Image (cartoon, rainbow, N blue to C red):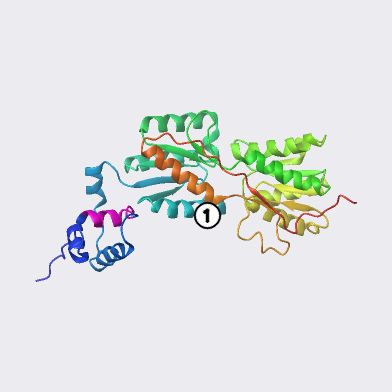
Amino acid sequence: MNGVKKKATIKDVALRAEVSPTTVSMVLNGKSAALPESTCERVRAAAAELNYSADVLARALVTKKTNIVGVVVPDISNAFFSEAVRHIQVEIARYGYDIILCNSEERAESDERYISLLAGRNVDGLILTPSAESFTAENAEKIKRLLAGLHVPYLFFDRYYTDGGTRVAVDNEASSYAATQYLLENGHKKIGVIAGPLTLNSSRNRLKGVRRALSERGLSLSDEFVYEGRYDFATGVNGGEMLLKKDVTAIFAFSDMQAYGVYESAKRAGKRIPDDVSVMGFDDNIYSSVLEVPLSTMRQPVETIAKEVCRSILALIENKEAEAPACCPARLVRRSSVADISKN
């Protein structure tokens, strides 16, 4: 007579590994730093042999914790967010936590739905990057009211509301200031900008950095030299087409994906990079160094930021006051897409 095989318990694993159930729990929950590695390996091997999986629901009922953190990002196809999530998942696993990832597709309605969904799953904390739509006054108030009523620790990652909440983000103003200084040092004064949505603090602060660098040289940035769109390829193409008609000598795209679009628009217009127009990006995606003309860009310290995100959300979960993270500004990466025209 065939029956259902009994599910292995933590006691079964302990017997197989010849350790206590407490030791098994410590190893499988990522809290085994004080244990010999040989013991940890024996426990993991025993768990694998018995196909042991923890009863998360039962554990949560006892401990009031799920050891799960919810992560909501606006666009997982954006290389910055996909890389950041990868680092967050690896880093937070070191502390015995897992993540549930939700992708809002830049929609405020999805932000609300996923925040409620994750709270309903009793996640221990939330890491939230609001969608562009969630920065309108009406939608922002909805999100803030929702978060305040859930009593779940949360922090904002990359994008944030300026009037409250723990946040972790790169110093966008300082980073774009450095990028613009680099263009100015190479003789570029007629600079066009392709921005992300200016409802977002990331895009506004990058624009502020550009204007500050120009102002220090007695220059200004007219609105007609700023193209606003999304942080995507299509925006780069459209913005590039517009700015090339204005005979700019350089285009600063606020994301590498936008910069790739500028390359395409330059190709269509018969313009050579950097001979006819220089291009500057922001992110340092994996493809930026292997383009036919490698892209000069600002490298975001994604791994460092991810570690700060994990440190801060875990502090909040443990009812500690999260320190204001001192995230480093992005680092200038000089490649071939910016020409020196200072002697022209």
**Does 25 appear in magenta?**
yes
Choose between 281 and 104: the one closer to the eye: 281
**Residue depicted at x 48% and y 53%:** 87
Q: Position of residue 289 (x, y in %)?
A: 66, 61
From the top left corner, tell me how far across and down residue 194 is, in percent.
70, 45
> Picture quarter containing residue 269?
bottom right
* Residue beneath disc 1: 83
Which residue occupies the extreme bottom position in the image? 1
Q: Tell me where residue 167 appears, x and y as whole percent.
A: 50, 37
Lateral position of residue 211 relative to residue 131, left or right: right
Task: Tell me the kind of residue under disc 1.
Answer: Glu
Would you call the spot at circle 1 few (<14 residues within 10 Å), some (14-19), or many (20 or more)?
some
Q: Residue at x 81, y 37 (%)?
A: 217
Q: Quadrant of residue 72?
A: top left
Residue 104 in view in this figure: no
Residue 120 falls within the magenta-colored stretch? no
Residue stretch rendered in magenta on the structure = 22-32
Relative to 291, residue 165 above or below:
above
Q: Nearer the viewer, residue 126 or 267?
A: 126
**Helix, strand, or loop for circle 1?**
helix
Give the answer, above or below, for where 295 lies relative to 183.
below
Instruction: From the viewer's side, name the closer residue of 28 and 273.
Output: 28
Q: What secondary structure characterizes most of the magenta part?
A: helix
